[in-house]
Amino acid sequence: MEIIEAIKSRRSVREFTAEDVSDGEIAQILEAGRWAPSGLNNQAWRFIIVRDKDTKKALSGFTHYGKTILDSAVGIVVFLDRESMYDYTKDVQSIGACIQNMLLAIHSMGLGAVWLGEILKNREKVNQLLGAPESCELMAVIAAGKPVEKPRSSSRKELAELTFREKFGNKW
């Protein structure tokens, strides 16, 4: 899949079939994530893979999007390891790039996923459930699986609404 096509055609998927995602597919997804850019190449991201039904059920209780977690084949819980970071803002940005790499990899593999951020309001509960050390700060949960086939569309603002020449106010 061409990268621009993948970027433009990827959509958040919240409904999944019962089909499993293999360990090999998960490894490919994580591999894509770990190749994201990071300041000083510190790679301050950490992942916990959640497949167990009981763990998914407990995790689902921490978000309004619990059904999405329950129905997914796998949850990839993404953390910032503060002991490995050197600049908070840069490291959070790197984790965003890591997550986007994983979402694009998932899409290119014919799978679907959604980046769940609303769960962050319960980050302490998630850390406790998953046994994450205090140095790890929850950044997101990616719910992934084989997508239910249905039309998905999205729109974007025009570049002229988002872009300026030299200074704000100078239209593109």
Image (spheres, rainbow, N blue to C red):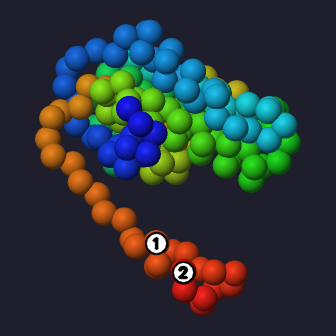
Which SS class for mark 1? helix
Q: Which amino acid does label 2 sit on?
A: Trp
Tell me if I can see residue 48 in this picture.
no
Quadrant in which the C terminus is drawn: bottom right
Instruction: State left or right for residue 3 relative to residue 36.
Output: left
Residue 163 in the image: x percent, y percent?
55, 75
- Against 159, residue 27 (above or below) is above
* Residue at horizontal 20 percent and vertical 20 percent from the top: 18
* Residue at horizontal 63 percent and vertical 81 percent from the top: 165
* Residue at horizontal 53 percent and vertical 36 percent from the top: 101
- Against 73, residue 113 (above or below) is below
Q: Which of 154 and 47 is in front in this view?
A: 154
Residue 38 in the image: x percent, y percent?
74, 38
Q: Which of 81 and 161 is in front in this view?
A: 161
Tell me if I can see residue 3 in this picture.
yes
Q: Which amino acid does label 1 sit on?
A: Leu
Residue holding disc 2 = 172
| Quarter of the image where one finds residue 170 | bottom right
| Quarter of the image where one finds residue 99 | top right
Could you say which disc has been placed on residue 159 in the image?
1
Instruction: State left or right for residue 136 relative to residue 163.
Output: right
| Label tally | 2
Q: How crowded is mark 2: few (under 14 residues within 10 Å), some or many (20 or more)?
A: few
> Are the two marked residues, 2 and 1, in contact with CB atoms closer than 8 angstroms?
yes
Q: How far apart are marks 2 and 1 (CA)?
A: 8 Å
Of the image marks 2 and 1, the number of the one nearer the N terminus: 1
- Against 21, residue 158 (above or below) is below
Which SS class for mark 2? loop
Residue 85 in the image: x percent, y percent?
81, 38
